Image: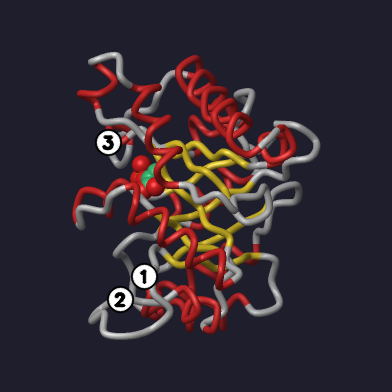
Amino acid sequence: MTMDRIPLIAGNWKMNGAVAESVALARAVAAGVAPGCELLVCPPAVLIPPVVAALKGSAVAVGGQDCHFAESGAHTGDIAAVMLVDAGCSHVILGHSERRADHGESDELVRAKTEAAHAAGLIAIVCVGETLAERDGGETLTRISSQIEGSLPDAVTAENTVIAYEPVWAIGTGRTASPADVEEVHAHIRADVERRFGKGVAAGVRILYGGSMKPSNAAELLAIDGVDGGLIGGASLKAEDFLSIATSCP
Ligand code: PEP
């Protein structure tokens, strides 16, 4: 972690929660805000308004878990980036492996969504990560490079984009990548970003690690060179665990 990149600890609540418990969770997170890092929670879409209201005046930001690439129109069930902004969001997670798997999202689609997020003024958290078969086949770095190349639009800056490295096999499984593997992939991503977007963007862009991060392993993962925070699923559903991870930021 360099001095210039403030760590971001982002909670992906996925498809969990109802109004009362989500408001309570948001309030508990806000009450324990950890100095030295930025905190973000990403509730399911229908819970964004009550969570935004609960977090009003706090330092905790709110994000969506997906958006459509179009601004409006005949897209039943989808949500536009501008709607997330209107609801009080500052960020949106895009290209999460669960969306890539459940909804067949391609790099091209993730790129179009990222463009829409940027146009709406959202910070896009673009997720990349290899499957276990790809890791076992020695294809991790080429897979990551092709996702980075295909999913990021040309207008990426250090301010409008965060990259999340999430090995698919480590999400929700209790398994984490080794510190050496995480360091290697993060350095690889930063080198790809430098080649395409230049030194300034590469030096400033935050690259998060995600995949079974929890209080017991957060300090080790967050201390790895090139890791600028975490995208946290399961452990973000308990304020105590989420805040414990946040206070582990170096
Ligand atoms: C995620 O869904 O982005 C994630 C990292 O989940 P978990 O922390 O539960 O592995």
Q: Nearer the viewer, residue 77 or 182?
A: 77
Image location (x, y in percent) of residue 185: 48, 24
Secondary structure type for disc 2: loop
User: Label 3: few (<14), some or many (≥20) within 10 Å?
Assistant: few
What number is the disc on residue 7? Answer: none
Q: Please state if 43 lies on the left or on the right of 54 as rendered.
A: left
The picture quadrant where one finds residue 205 is: top right
Q: Are marks 2 and 1 in contact (CB under 8 Å)?
A: yes
Q: Residue at x 53, y 27 (%)?
A: 186
Camera-side mark, 2 or 3 = 2
Count the marks: how many?
3
Residue receiving disc 2: 78
Sequence-first disc among 2 and 1: 1
Mark 3 CB in 8 Å range of ligand 1? yes
* Quadrant in which the C terminus appears: top right
The picture quadrant where one finds residue 169 is: top left
Q: Using the image, determine if residue 209 lies above or below residue 65.
A: above
User: Which amino acid type is shown beneath numbered disc 1?
Assistant: His
Q: Nearer the viewer, residue 17 or 162?
A: 162
Residue receiving disc 1: 68
User: Which amino acid type is shown beneath numbered disc 2?
Assistant: Asp
Image location (x, y in percent) of residue 148: 45, 38
